[in-house]
Every structure is written in structure tokens, then in C-alpha cells.
Image (tube, rainbow, N blue to C red):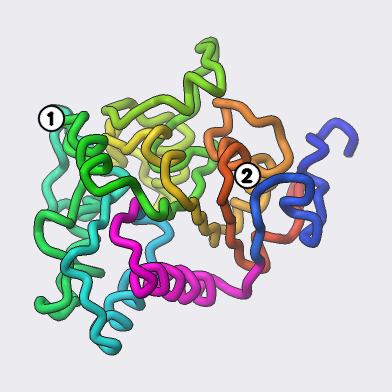
Amino acid sequence: MSELPAYLDVPPEKLGEGTRVKVRVLGDMQSVARDFADALLAEIRAGAKTFIVPVGPVDQFPLLADAINRQHVDCRDVCFINMDEYLGDDDRWIDASHPLSFRGFTDRLFYDRLNPELAPRKENRVFPDPTNCSAIAKLIEQRGGVDVCYGGIGINGHIAFNEPPEAGEEMSVEEFAALPMRVLNLTRETRTINSVTVGGEIAVIPRRAVTVGMKECLGARKMRFYCNRPWQSAVVRRVLHGPVTASCPASLLRTHGNAEITVTDYVAQKPDIRLR
């Protein structure tokens, strides 16, 4: 197995060892979703007001809505900045009624489930707008920064839709870390893995997206990332124990002073690399 990258052989108990990133291993997918919801609610209760949040992982939002309602937590002044959204051929948001719309999903699974007296105000429910790419940075500045950036990690190591440079493109870690919110093409890898969750048809996955930048994500006071897909066993090891490089965007978590990755027990296991 010497021809394989050494990081793939890192055992579960050594994940994150020698890095600044704290690694937590929980149980199944549901336990990770519950932890995500509980952690976000605890931050709100502690006074945090501004968050960057993903759509994926997905299962935490109904749990969070239920907890907010049950515990009567006032979230009117809490601002949720969603990481990204798919775009159509006109570089505008796909319609919220589209089955793949992140905006529609977030409404159905989170905002529409909240007691209106507790829910974030409309102006605090923010998605990156492809027609105004400077708006998120201005909002973050007005709110005094992002308290916590939550997220997942893509098959190519992306966070939000911050795709790694294509083959032949040169970009330093510093240049990549400074990338702001922008409109971009999705890589073939991202479109392929995203198609797996919708029946395996890559043709239905949009080719363009808008995303908050690495600059906005890395500028958060805390970074909390969650991994619950079996294929993330390998990419988590690359993120934590491969080189810190723009070709694996989430590896830049290792440059942050307060970053944490939480994984399921099966993601923590070494990838089983063999034909079968």
C-alpha cells in the first residue's frame, strides 16, 4: 500500500494529531445532526448573533427549529448567512421552488417550522446574492464579524462552494484564503458527488453557483465543521494530514486558531481502499 498517500493510513484515534484542529468522533448520522443543532443553539444562548451556515449536512435544521420553539429561544436578532446557492444559466438564483434550491430547502426545513415570534427577522435570513457580491462582506462588518462558521466538506475538500483551482491553475494558500464571495463554475467532482444524493443524474445538477468566500469563512471567530458521509473518511484525512494547499480548501482550517471537525464513527474509520 506504499503507493497510497500516507494520510489515508491515519487511525481514528490519531485524527487531527499534530494539528490545531480539534477532532470529535460521535456515533451515527443522527447523533452528528443532534450535536450540530445543540451546538448552534448553545451559541445563540451564549449571545452569538451572526453565523455562516450550510445546507449540507442537512438533518440538523428540523432539530434546531424544534428546540428553538420548545425552549422559546428568541432568535429575531440572530443572523444566518447561508453559504451558497445554485444558479441558473442566467447567473441568477434558481427558483426557490426548484427541488435543489438551498433557499427553498432552508425555508421548508427551518424557517417555516419556527414560531414566527421567535424566528429571525426577514433581513437576517441571508443568502449570497449573485447580483451584489460585496453585500455579505458589508453585512459582516456591520454586525461586528461572524461568531461561528459552520459547514461540511466536499469530495474535493471544498468548503461552501469554494472549489479548488483547476489543473494548471496556480494559486498560493494566501491568495486562496483571500478569495471573497463570488460566482463560479462548479467542478465536475462536486457535480458528480452531489448527483449521488439525487439519484445519480449529473445532468440535473446546475453548473454555476454563488458562494461566500474563503475570506468570509476563515474570518469567523470559530469554525465548526461536520462530516457524516461514508466517502468523507478519506477527504477528512487529506484535510487534516495532507498538505495545506488551495487544492484542498478545507485544509486551510489548519491555519485557523479555533477550528473543529466532528465526524461520525464510520467516517473516523480508515477508508477501505480495495476493489469490491
Residue plotted at (58% across, 56% down): 261
Q: Magenta span covers which residues? A: 25-52
Say which element carries label 2. helix
Q: Position of residue 235 (x, y in %)?
A: 63, 44
Q: Residue 138 falls in which quadrant of the image?
A: top left
Residue designated by label 2: 235
Q: Position of residue 192 (x, y in %)?
A: 44, 40
* Amino acid on which the number 2 mark rests in the picture: Val
Tell whether position 48 is magenta.
yes
Q: Disc 2 to disc 1, how far (Cα)?
A: 33 Å
Q: Is residue 241 left or right of residue 129?
A: right
* Amino acid on which the number 1 mark rests in the picture: Thr
For disc 2, the neighbor class at 10 Å (few under 14, some 14 to 19, many from 20) is: many
Is 162 located above or below residue 26 in the figure?
above
Say which element carries label 1. loop
Tell whether position 201 is magenta.
no
Residue plotted at (26% across, 40% down): 141
Q: Residue 268 falls in which quadrant of the image?
A: bottom right
| Nearer to us in this view, 261 or 155 | 261
The answer to whether the residue labelled 2 contacts the one labelled 1, judged by CB atoms less than 8 Å apart, is no
Residue plotted at (38% across, 54% down): 147
Residue designated by label 1: 131
Quadrant the N terminus occupies: top right
What secondary structure is the magenta-colored segment mainly?
Answer: helix
Is 116 located above or below residue 244 in the figure?
below
Q: Position of residue 27 (x, y in %)?
A: 62, 75
| Nearer to us in this view, 100 or 58 | 58
Residue at the extreme bottom of the image, as rendered: 70
Disc on the earlier residue, 2 or 1: 1
